[in-house]
Amino acid sequence: MPAIFLTLLLLLLPTTAMAQVYKCKGKSGETMYSEHPCDARAEPMKLREHTAPTPVAASGQASAEASVEGSEPSAEGSSSAPSAASAANAKAAEESRAAERSCIANATASVYGPSNDRVSTLQQQMTLLNEQLANAPDAQRSQALRTRMATFRQAISREHGNAHAQMNAARQRCLEQHRSAR
């Protein structure tokens, strides 16, 4: 009885979502992990996939445990073995999900990599302007530097917005392309 309860409890747990994780080096050399690529050369890390057992596998496990305890598995338990067709469908669905994840990872790298490079350039220019602002000889020069910095901040915001919009569109294309294959 406890094995059945535990199996039912495991079935209620959500499966883990597969997200891409990128390992990056920060400007001061520290290691960072991000869901977005740090640059155009970034490659996703290989992560182990843990998923909850499927109902078919769980019922097969319960039947196996029942036979270990010395009792005969019921006729229902023996007929719950996955058929070849359902196994093939499950494999095709998993391959489609893997292709979908790969499509999204490629889109992420192609959108966020160049965007992050452009933002980094703008931030470097902001740093230089900030240094010039600290040494500005007069109020007029200070105001001109602040105006340029505000322009760069707006450009960074636009860049982030454009990258997110491009990524949402690419994600949608990947989902439509690979879900229609299922």
Image (cartoon, rainbow, N blue to C red):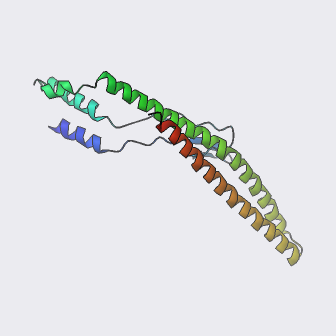
Residue that lies at the very extreme toward the top in this rendered image:
84
> Is residue 147 at all visible to an observer of this figure?
yes
* Residue at screen point 81% across, 63% down: 129
Residue that lies at the very extreme toward the right in this rendered image:
137
Residue that lies at the very extreme toward the bottom in this rendered image:
139
Front residue of 11/127: it is 11
Whether residue 18 sits left or right of residue 155 in the image: it is: left
**Percent from the top left, x then y, of residue 90?**
37, 30
Asked where in the image residue 58 lies, by quadrant, the reply is: top left
**Percent from the top left, x then y, of residue 126?**
77, 61
Front residue of 9/111: it is 111
* Residue at screen point 38% across, 37% down: 51
**Percent from the top left, x then y, of residue 64?**
20, 25
Quadrant occupied by the C terminus: top left
| Image position of 152 with respect to 174: above or below | below
Residue that lies at the very extreme toward the left in this rendered image:
71
**Percent from the top left, x then y, of residue 108?**
61, 43
| Image position of 157 with respect to 58: above or below | below
Quadrant occupied by the N terminus: top left
Asked where in the image residue 74 lies, by quadrant, the reply is: top left
* Residue at screen point 54% across, 46% down: 172
Whether residue 71 sits left or right of residue 176 in the image: it is: left
Tell how many labels.
0
* Residue at screen point 81% across, 66% down: 148
> Is residue 38 at all visible to an observer of this figure?
no
Whether residue 174 sits left or right of residue 91 in the image: it is: right
